[in-house]
Amino acid sequence: MNFQPLGKRVLVKRVEEANTTISGIIIPDNAKEKPSRGEVVAVSKEVTELACGNQVLFGKYAGNEVALGADKYIVLEVEDIFGIIG
């Protein structure tokens, strides 16, 4: 995959949440919300505050989903990212 975001954008792969709750209840796929955290996999040349590999937190409805090959990603504006995790 070769994708270079333009403007102040980053390409993020969503990090899936656990399938069970703390009490052990299994959550089916159709009941789960889309995760609002992910790993940065590509960064625009205009973005200096993020790097590939950063774990980030972003808005639930932010960005645009794209499919590159068999994988799904989300293209986010830097303003849609709340912060770096860890």
Image: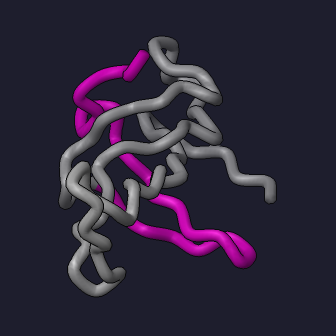
In the rendered image, residue 65, in percent from the top left (x then y), is placed at: 42, 68
User: Is residue 60 placed above or below 34 in the rendered structure?
Assistant: above
User: Is residue 51 placed above or below 55 in the rendered structure?
Assistant: above
**Quadrant position of residue 60:** bottom left
Q: Residue furthest right?
A: 1
- Drawn side of residue 81 relative to residue 68, left or right: left
In the rendered image, residue 40, in percent from the top left (x then y), is placed at: 55, 37
Tell me the magenta residue range.
Answer: 63-86
- Drawn side of residue 38 relative to residue 72, left or right: left
58 or 44, which is in the foreground?
58
Quarter of the picture containing the C terminus is top left
Main secondary structure type of the part rendered in magenta? strand
Q: Residue at x 51, y 47 (%)?
A: 12
**Quadrant position of residue 57:** top left
28 or 54, which is in the foreground?
28
- Drawn side of residue 71 relative to residue 23, left or right: right
**Quadrant position of residue 72:** bottom right
Q: Residue at x 38, y 54 (%)?
A: 17
Q: Is residue 84 highlighted in magenta?
A: yes
In the rendered image, residue 67, in percent from the top left (x then y), is placed at: 59, 74
In the rendered image, residue 76, in percent from the top left (x then y), is placed at: 38, 47
